[in-house]
Amino acid sequence: MAKKGDERQPLEQEEAVMVYIAPGVMQSLAGVAARKQESLQELMSAAEDGDLEAEYRLALDYCNGEEGAPKDEKKAFFWFRRAAEGGNIAAQYDLALCYIQGIGTPADPVRAAELLAAAAEAGYLPAICELGLCYELGTGVARDPQRAAELYREAADQEYAPAQCNLGFFYYQGIGVEEDAAQAVSWFEKSAQQGYPRALCLLGECYDRGAGVERDLKKAAELYRGAHEQGYAPGTCSLGLCYELGRGVEADLEKAVKLYRQAADQGEAQAQCNLGYCYYQGIGVAENDSKAAQWFAKAADQGHARAQMLLGECFEFGYGVEKDLAKAAELYRLSNEQGYVPAACSLGVCYEFGGGVERDLKKAAELYRRAAECGHPRAQCNFGYCCYRGIGVERDEKEAVRWFRRAAGQDYGRALDLLGECYDRGTGVEQDLEQAAKLYRRAHEQGYAPGTCSLGLCYELGRGVPEDKKEAALLYRQAADKGDRNAQCNLGFLYYHGIGVEQDHRQAVQWFTKAADQGHARGRYWLGVCLEKGQGLKRDLKKAEELYRQAAGQGSREAKEALERLERRRKQKNPFKRLFGFGM
């Protein structure tokens, strides 16, 4: 895990330098400022005399803090209203935006829609498009996607780039019109030809995915770059992803991080999440869970579903934040409510084990099922396991195999191992040891340690593969080094008996201890054996008996027999206890 802490270091540090500005330049700058003040006074005088154009220009200057005017939203609203009341259509449009966004006045979406309708009636293209957005989102009017599409088309047919883009998006997503990727591309192209950055980005996405056009990753990257160069944060983020994955450009992780940071600093939630993930996994930057959690939090605060889930994971495991299972479960819930499938699976785990929520096996199984039906491999495996063990659902081994097979088809390691187990035991399918070994091997090739251990057992016992004790030992060690407790115990067993390796009781004790420390019943039993016999460590019957009791409590038959053996030995050493049932 990355070190915790906030390393506040700028990306680039420049040495402090003394900057000399010639007196003439300073006088020139002062002159410009003075002339702006004169212009502002002249503009204000004209506006106060009822000049509509002056009223509108003055409103814009106050709104943007330009041309000598201080940024002042209330004054901007005042002059927009004055100009609008005088019949300036552009002012009516901007006044509507003030009402929508609450600039200089309390938000009033109904009034905004009225003003936009009036400006749209006069044929003002920005107002027609913005009114369409009102109908799309239900801002100040009843939501009506079909009416929104009509308004976008009206403005799009008159070459208004934002409306062309919006209409294209409707075709892209099937909003208010029948979904048609080719039509979407056509409208995106019209808008992009005018340099509209959102259209450039969306057209890039079409080329990226092969939606409505032949897939062309290089073309996609070029379009993303065009949007990025106009400061469009989603385009910057998409270009960053191209560099991260080497899609249409040569992979450059550091450049990807730089682009994500630029977009993230502009408030782009997707970029904030991606930048967080780079810190989370050490992609193009040093791994830093604390910074990862910070960026996930910024994106999650904007309702970004993936960021909510990843931040939940941080809270679940204590990555970069203090561990908080209740907070993790809440974040998973928020993400799941937005339909983010992986979050449904993570929330299911919370309910299965009672992590941050009250344990509810039926709810866990239902969450797994929903995510599984969406094709999520982890959820498919988890739901299969519920069917396998009867967790929250009725036990159904054939149904378990069906779900394991679906997850295994996506090379999900745990599912490959469990499906192998089904073939190994003939559970839900006809027993097939060779098929079991093949599945274990695939799980092993995915780096899934339990699968590696299972394959090792095949080689140890010659089940489905030729017997090879040395290969078994190698596989056990690989899995044991990854912390798999079954493999640790099995490797200890080989060292204890000298199977496939040179006999070494000390090595055996080390591996039995690792397994026992993880609560492994058989590991506890064999460590107890070593303690009882003094093999590989000092003899200690008290500790041995304690380990036997722990293992017996977990259902170990061997441990129960060991306890009975110790009890018989005690009775044999005390004849009075044997004869009369009491000790001296």
Image: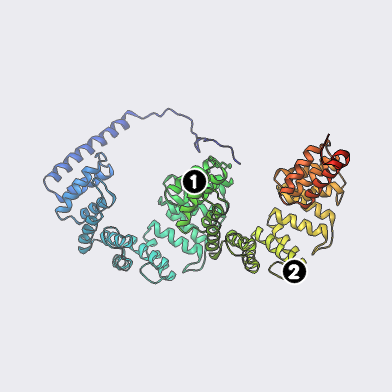
* Residue under the point 57% across and 60% down: 392
Label number found at residue 191: none
- For badge 1, the amino acid type reads Lys
Residue drawn at (70%, 70%) of the image? 429
Query: Can you see residue 392?
Result: yes
User: Where 290 sits versus 434, above or below?
Assistant: above
Residue located at (77% from left, 66% from top): 433
Q: Position of residue 282 (x, y in %)?
A: 59, 45
Q: Which mark is residue 327?
A: 1
**In the figure, is residue 203 to the left or right of 545?**
left
Badges 1 and 2: C-beta atoms under 8 Å apart? Answer: no
Going from N to C along the chain, the mark reached first, 1 or 2, is 1
Q: Could you give the CA–CA distance between mark 1 and mark 2, rounded to whole angstroms?
A: 44 Å
State whether residue 330 is above or below residue 153: above
Residue farthest to the front? 580
**Could you tell me residue 270's position as x and y percent?**
46, 52
Give the residue at mark 2: 431
Query: In the visual, does 246 lie left or right of 513?
Result: left
SS of the residue under disc 1 = helix
> Residue 383 falls in which quadrant of the image?
bottom right
Q: Under tag 2, what secondary structure?
A: loop
